[in-house]
Amino acid sequence: MNRFLFKLATYLQLSVAIFMSTGCTPVQPYFMHEKPQLEHYLNSVASVEYPDVEVDRLPETTESLAPLTVDNHEYVFWDMSLEECVEMALTNARFLPTTSGTAEFRQGIASQFVSGTAAQFGSVYDVALQETTTQGIALAIDGNGNRLLPRGVVRANQVGGVEDALAEFDAVFSGFVDVSNIDRPQNTSAFDADPNDDNNPQFLQSFDTSQQSAISKRLATGGVASMRQILQYGRNDSGNIVNQISNSDYTTAIEAQVQHPLSRNRGTYINRIPVLLASTNEDITITNYEAQVRNLIRDVENSYWDLYLAYRAVSTATTARDFAQLTAEVSEFKEQFGEDSLQAVSQARAQYFNFQRRLIGALNGSNLPGEDRFGVYGRERALRELLGITITDGRLIRPTHEPTQARVDFDWEQSVAQMLYLSPELREKKYQIKQAQLELALAKNQLLPDVNLSLLYRWVGVGSHFGSTSRSPRFPSPESSALTELTSGDFQEGEIRLEFNMPVGVRREKARIRNAQLTLRSREDFLRESERMAVSQLSDAVAKTKSHYSQLHMAANEWQASELEANTRLYQFQNRPERIDPNTVLQSQQRLAEAQINYYRALTEYNKSLNYVDYLRGTLLAQSGITLREGPWNSKAYCDALERARERAAGKQWQYGVTRPGVIRRGPVKNAEGAVLMYGDEINTQSVPANLGESLLTPQGMAIPEVNDKSLQTLPTPKDLISPELNRPAMPTSADQSAIEPSANEQAARADIAQATWNDNRSQEVHVANVESQPVGSGLRQSSPATKNLGIEPVRRKPITGRSTTSVPPDHL
């Protein structure tokens, strides 16, 4: 025995030593058919991966050409009017490339679109998305198939669309089938000495089945109506227990139950509020969509005028460059004969290259201070972004719609009335106030006690069988039928239940009411302040129209005077070098260039300000001939709507209290004239008589003088304007004495300088020294002055006296 214990101890010690020698070193398992390539091995949890999504790209994305640059002028002009741009933008708009708000200036949104989400921008899907928004909570029922009434307060941000809110009143059908059995011993030996007695068996064996079907519907008055069918089957296999007639029986019943609140949540006024909140949410979405469309129209028009101004900046830079080139050529020519200094020639050359640099910047854009960072090509790309077309397709959009010079005066009282009624932003705030009123009514209703009355009536039938082909005997016969007993109506039951629940302190309910009251008050005050700020915006916009028109008038006079000065000084420099300094000629050319671009800036800003006034008044869409309508429904929907209309027309009007709430909306939005009739009496803007002697500036009422303007279609193309190699101006090859002799027209223009009558006649024609042109390299360079036709007849644009509109089909929206 001791030897056996010794061996056992030895083996045990050896096993412990081997186990301890391994320590905590993990051992990799061995796998059969293991491959050295571990393609399924992952050494990180998170990594940058690409989603498995394939969406068809637009042809405008994949077929876009290389951008137009300083060395790429391969395109043809695409003449487009403002109405065509607006129509194209609305036709192609699925997402509206604009931002919300009423700011006068907005930045480009291409970067915001790329880095943003769909919820940040308006789209044609917004209204439909709001209508189909649903809650994540399903309709709840209890174990008997009854709808459970919602508890608490519903807020506007907690409801979905109208269909989702109406779904609370849908009927819910429910049912279940339950099958079970019992097979267990019973503790009966203490009461019965014979465990095999059938009247009290020691082992219980049974089989039970229950089935229920119910339909329950929430009523508009707050109650719940339910109908139930119940079927129960039980079989006892343990013998005749307590003298049962049969070891199995069927019990069937039909129940009708009505539950109705008597205090809290009673009436259609309270129960319809979630539907009205959902409906106002849809109205707010429609209002936001209208504002987004309006913003898109304004952005398109602003981009159109920005492109127009960019073209005019190129034209102005071209004219200034040509003047500087001519001055440099004359200065170099005179320097060869000793009539001018090398410093004057260098200054003229520097002026030329300065204007040439500005011309390149005006065409291609530049980030240098004081220059347009977009240019013609950049402004055209920005307009294409709004139009929803290819960014570069071998065509260059050229505006054909000239900005108006007509003076426009707005009626202040009518403008304020139109803004207060038609502004989408103010209309949205009024919908929010209506929502706060409904939420306050719900909060007050929760202060009432929760008293519910339940009425239940039941028809019951019990039988040994469920049914039979013939009229079976009555229960308790072993051949009785449960359906026979049920249809006989001999067994009926009823139940009346009254439930009462009321918090004693009601602190939460009172706090909820106070919060709803404060919310309503804050929204009302916010509407008042918003209306006041809107009037401030409108006042600033109307004042800007007056200012820009005055600036336009002064800029035209400045252009006219600067042009006469520049032409005269250039003539004197060509023919009377002893009377004028070359630096004076260059400065006059600089002032002429600035006067021209200031005129076009004032002109485009004046048209933008007119557009902004219509924007703030809420009449921009009407002025553009645009109306918002929903898309077409299918024919079945129109048929159903006609049937409901005929059904209601055949009914009898019955005024009763449960139709509350009364008025939520006042019908469709009226036009501008209707807005004046509705709010015109509330506007009282009687001004204080002004002291004309104390005015800061006498208003300018004169018409805008005519300037030496040309149509965009007559200007040379950028390919003819810019040379890839910026060399100095070419020197004239020969000098003709007759070319520098003053002509009769030049002498007349020079004589007009000394007269004061030219200042009274603002629309006089200003003659510019005409020159012959010849292409030098790939740019248009000026050569020697011409000897004939020194006067260029000015071109007068026809002012646009009215705003032409284009009706956009509703399906384009």
Image (tube, rainbow, N blue to C red):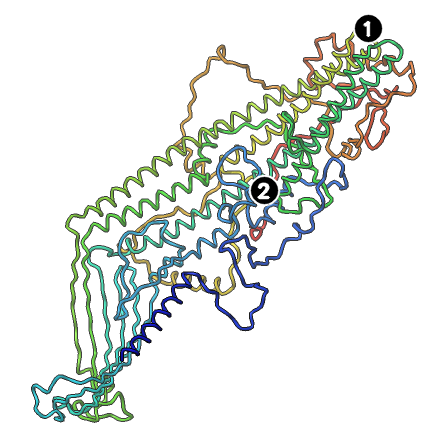
Circle 2 residue? 110
The quadrant holding residue 309 is: top right
- Residue type at numbered disc 1: Glu
Q: Secondary structure at mark 1?
A: helix
Earlier in the chain: of badge 1 and badge 2, it is 2
Residue displayed at 33% across by 68% down: 172
Nearest the camera: 12 or 152? 12
Q: Measured along the vertical axis of the image, is residue 529 above or below residue 287?
A: above
Circle 1 residue? 578
Q: Residues within 10 Å of mark 2 (few under 14, many from 20)?
A: some
Q: Residues within 10 Å of mark 1 (few under 14, many from 20)?
A: few
Image coordinates of residue 332 in percent, x first then y, are 85, 16
Q: How many marks?
A: 2
Q: Measured along the vertical axis of the image, is residue 13 above or below residue 770?
A: below
Image coordinates of residue 149 in percent, x first then y, are 27, 60
Nearest the camera: 23 or 527? 23
Q: In the image, 402: left or right of 260?
A: right
- Residue type at numbered disc 2: Ala
**Quadrant housing the N terminus:** bottom left
Image coordinates of residue 3 in percent, x first then y, are 30, 78
For the residues marked 1 and 2, what is the alpha-carbon distance in whole angstroms?
Answer: 57 Å
Nearest the camera: 333 or 712? 333
Residue displayed at 28% across by 51% down: 153
* Residue 656 shows up from this direction: no
Marks 1, 2: nearer the viewer = 2
* Residue 786 shows up from this direction: yes
Image coordinates of residue 112 in percent, x first then y, are 54, 42
